[in-house]
Amino acid sequence: MARFAPLYDVQIAAASADVRLTIDRRDKLGLGGPGGAAQLVTIQLKIESPASPAQVEKLSQHAERACHAARSLALGVPVESETLHNGQRIGREG
């Protein structure tokens, strides 16, 4: 957000983000269910600024478009993982 603020003439006095996941915990507890993946990600930005609400909204929209994490979650990109043990790959192949 701070990176793009000068583009919209927005001075930021304070900023924070509250990120929350909605999940179904049944699988995690061994009770079945759809698995532990998030069903919804909610991001709330709090901005303190003397700028107008319209300027802050434009900045927020730009920052959201530029956020790799938010865009990746929204598009549902594949996730790859691996485990290295003493420098050697173990576990799943592929």
Image: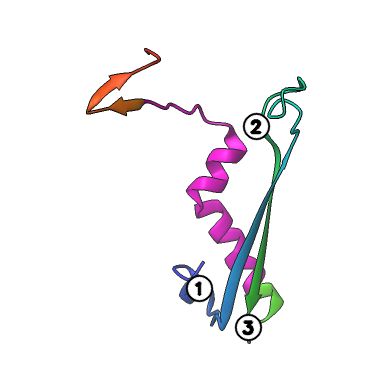
Magenta residue span = 56-82
Q: Tag 1: Cα neighbours inside 10 Å, few (<14), some, or many (≥20)?
A: some
Measuring from the top left, give residue 80's x and y in whole percent: 43, 26
Task: Let me know if residue 70 is in the magenta part.
Answer: yes
Q: Which residue is mark 1?
A: 5
Measuring from the top left, give residue 8's x and y in whole percent: 54, 74
* Residue under the point 50% across and 53% down: 66
* Residue under the point 52% across and 66% down: 1
Q: Tag 2: Cα neighbours inside 10 Å, few (<14), some, or many (≥20)?
A: few
Quadrant in which residue 73 is drawn: top right
User: Alpha carbon of mark 2 to alpha carbon of mark 1: how far?
Assistant: 33 Å
Task: Let me know if residue 85 is in the magenta part.
Answer: no
Secondary structure at badge 2 equals loop
In primary-sequence order, the first of circles 2 and 1 is 1
Q: Main secondary structure of the magenta part?
A: helix
* Residue under the point 55% across and 60% down: 62
User: Alpha carbon of mark 2 to alpha carbon of mark 3: how far?
Assistant: 38 Å
Q: Nearer the viewer, mark 2 or mark 1?
A: 2
In primary-sequence order, the first of circles 3 and 1 is 1
Secondary structure at badge 3 equals loop
Secondary structure at badge 1 equals helix
- The disc labelled 1 sits on which kind of residue? Ala
User: Alpha carbon of mark 3 to alpha carbon of mark 1: how far?
Assistant: 10 Å
- The disc labelled 2 sits on which kind of residue? Ala
Quadrant in which residue 90 is drawn: top left
Q: Residue furthest top?
A: 93
Q: Which residue is mark 2?
A: 37
Q: Nearer the viewer, mark 2 or mark 3?
A: 2
Query: How has the structure been colored for display?
Result: rainbow
Q: Which residue is mark 3?
A: 51
